[in-house]
C-alpha cells in the first residue's frame, strides 16, 4: 500500500513494488484520478484517501486485507512543503503536522495488528533530509519531518521483535510535483529555497529514490538516503552542532543575502 501514490515518489514506489513482484499494489492519494491512472498502469487498486482521516485509513486497511490478503509493506508517503517561520498561522502548522506525523501514526496503528498477527511486515515512512538536518525557510517542514524520523525510530525499536521492519526515507531534492502542489509554490520558486536545496547535491528522479527504498527494504536498513551526502552532513551535525549551525547560517545568507526570508516579517 502506498499513500501519496498518485505522483512523484509515491507513483515510483507503486511501480517499483509491482516490478519487484508484489501480488497487489494499492495506490492511495487525495487525488483520486491520479491514483486511478497509476493503479491502472500496474493492475492495482486505486483509492481516494485523505491521510489525515484516521477512520478512512482504518477502513482502507481492513478492506484491503479482507479483499486481497495481508499487507506486507505500507509506504506512508504523502507530504507537502510550505514556507514560513514562527509567524506562520497555527492552522497551517497543524495541517502539516497532521500530514507529516499523524498520518504515519494512523497508518501504523491501523496496519501493525494485522502485520504482527501475520508474522511481520514493513513500514516505509517518507520523511526528508530536513528531518535529519533542517529546511531553510520552512519551520513547519523542518519540525514535522524531524518528528517523522523520531517516530520511525521509536516504531523500529518497539516492534522489531514482532517482525516489523521500519525504514525511513530521507531524500534531498527529488524531481516531483511537491513544489507545484504547495500552497506556497510561487514563494518557493521565486524565493530561491527550492533552487538552493537542489543546487547542493543535485535533483534525483523519483525512480532512483524508489530503487533505493527497495534496496533498503531488502536489506532491512533503517535510513534510506538516496543522496549519500546526507549521512556526512548528519555526522557533522552530531559531532559539532555549533559548527554545523554556523555553516547553515552561511548557506542561508548565500540564498538570501538581503535577509528577505520567512521570519523577517517579525521585525
Image: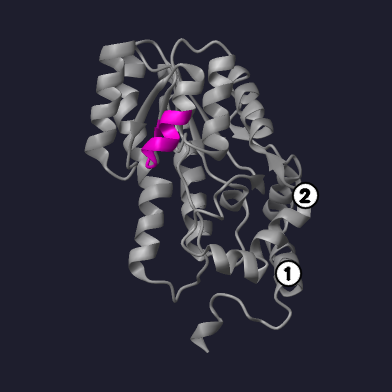
Q: Secondary structure at mark 1?
A: helix
Q: Secondary structure at mark 2?
A: helix
Q: How is the image coloured?
A: one colour
Residue 140: which disc? Answer: none
Q: Which residues are magenta?
A: 28-37
Where, quadrant-wise, is the N terminus in this rendering?
A: top left
Q: Residue at x 76, y 46 (%)?
A: 232
Residue 61: image quadrant is: top left
Task: Find disc 1 in the rendering and name its residue.
Answer: 246
> On the rendered structure, is 56 left or right of 176?
left
For the residue carrying disc 1, how many other residues have a C-alpha within 10 Å: few (<14), some (14-19), or many (20+)? Answer: few
Q: Main secondary structure of the magenta part?
A: helix
Q: Residue at x 35, y 60 (%)?
A: 94
Task: Find disc 2 in the rendering and name its residue.
Answer: 201
What is the x, y in percent for residue 176?
60, 45
What is the x, y in percent for residue 209?
65, 34
Viewer-proximal residue among 201 and 166: 201
Q: Vertical placement of 185 versus 73: above or below? A: below
Residue 78: image quadrant is: top left
**Distance from the alpha carbon under mark 2 to that under mark 1:** 19 Å
Q: Is residue 91 visible?
A: yes
Amino acid at each position: 500500500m502506498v499513500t501519496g501514490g498518485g505522483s512523484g515518489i509515491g507513483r515510483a514506489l507503486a511501480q517499483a513494488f509491482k516490478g519487484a513482484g508484489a501480488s497487489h499494489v494499492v495506490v492511495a492519494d487525495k487525488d483520486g484520478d491520479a491514483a486511478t491512472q497509476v493503479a491502472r498502469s500496474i493492475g492495482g487498486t486505486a483509492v481516494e484517501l485523505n491521510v489525515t482521516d484516521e477512520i478512512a485509513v482504518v477502513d482502507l486497511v481492513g478492506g484491503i486485507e479482507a479483499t486481497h490478503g495481508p499487507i506486507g509493506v505500507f509506504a506512508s508517503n504523502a507530504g507537502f512543503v510550505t514556507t514560513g517561520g514562527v509567524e506562520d498561522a497555527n492552522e497551517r502548522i497543524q495541517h502539516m503536522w497532521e500530514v507529516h506525523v499523524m498520518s504515519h501514526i494512523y497508518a501504523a496503528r491501523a496496519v501493525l495488528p494485522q502485520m504482527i498477527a501475520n508474522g511481520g511486515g514493513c513500514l516505509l515512512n517518507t520523511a526528508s533530509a530536513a528531518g535529519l538536518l533542517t529546511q531553510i525557510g520552512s519551520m513547519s517542514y523542518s519540525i514535522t519531518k524531524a518528528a517523522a524520523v523520531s517516530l520511525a525510530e521509536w516504531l523500529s525499536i518497539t516492534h522489531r521483535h514482532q517482525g516489523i521492519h521500519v525504514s525511513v526515507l530521507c531524500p534531498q531534492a527529488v524531481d516531483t510535483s511537491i513544489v507545484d502542489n504547495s500552497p506556497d509554490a510561487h514563494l518557493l520558486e521565486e524565493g530561491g529555497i527550492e533552487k538552493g536545496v537542489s543546487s547542493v547535491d543535485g535533483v534525483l528522479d523519483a525512480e532512483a529514490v524508489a530503487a533505493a527504498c527497495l534496496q533498503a527494504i531488502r536489506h532491512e536498513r533503517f535510513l534510506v538516503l538516496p543522496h549519500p551526502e546526507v549521512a556526512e552532513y548528519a555526522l557533522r551535525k552530531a559531532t559539532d552542532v555549533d559548527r554545523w549551525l554556523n555553516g547553515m547560517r552561511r548557506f542561508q545568507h548565500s540564498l538570501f543575502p538581503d535577509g528577505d526570508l520567512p521570519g523577517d516579517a517579525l521585525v
